[in-house]
Image (cartoon, rainbow, N blue to C red):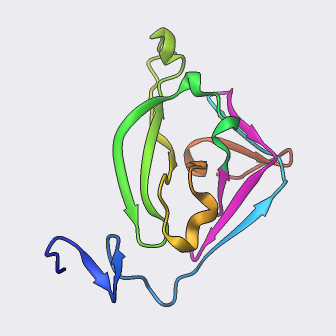
Amino acid sequence: MLRADQWFEEEQPIHVHPKDPYKRVDILPSMRKITVKVDGVLVAESSSNMFLFETLLRPRYYLPKSSVQWQYLTESETVTKCPYKGAAHYEFLPLWSDYHVTIDGRKHQDLIWWYPYTTNESALIADMVCFYNEKVDVWVDGVKEQT
């Protein structure tokens, strides 16, 4: 069956664009402790993670959903697609949103995402969450990452 609204490589659907043969994605399990804070508030911590290394990008730390303080998250409408990982869904952190409180008027949008359905090669990060390292404070085994 032919579809005009989707690209394929052979029978495999392509997300966004064809894959670059010079780009690589590696995913490794890690027991290193990852701590994530936003405006000094602990929003996630885990020692059961997946580290994702993608050519020319910063390492990304994928944490189990159970490690996140969900009371700080509110669902976002943002969805992005990656040919290497799949379609990502986002959340944003208007701190203390369950109580409709804004701290200094600061709302942090689209800081966290996950792939509910990944591509085959990225199955290890399916349904795990990731934070933008550049927009949050991240500690790896107690050492703060440089932004």
**Magenta stretch prevailing secondary structure:** strand
Image coordinates for residue 51, horizontal then vertical, percent: 70, 61
Picture layout, residue 48 above or below residue 22 = above
Viewport quadrant of the N terminus? bottom left
Q: Is residue 64 left or right of residue 90?
A: right
**Magenta residues (range):** 40-62
Q: Is residue 58 visible?
A: no
Say which quarter of the image contains residue 43: top right
x, y percent for residue 112: 52, 43
Residue 52 against residue 115 in the figure, above or below: below
Q: Nearer the viewer, residue 38 or 84?
A: 84
**Residue 97 in view, yes or no:** yes
Where is residue 123 drawn, in percent x and y? 58, 65
Query: Vertically, is 10 above or below 138?
Result: below
Residue 71 location (% of width, % of height): 57, 21
In the shown orientation, is residue 27 left or right of residue 143?
left
Magenta stretch contains residue 52: yes
Q: Quadrant of residue 24?
A: bottom right
Above or below, comparing residue 36 to residue 63 in the picture? above
Residue at 65 percent across and 34 percent down: it is 68
At x 34% / y 76%, what residue is drawn? Answer: 14
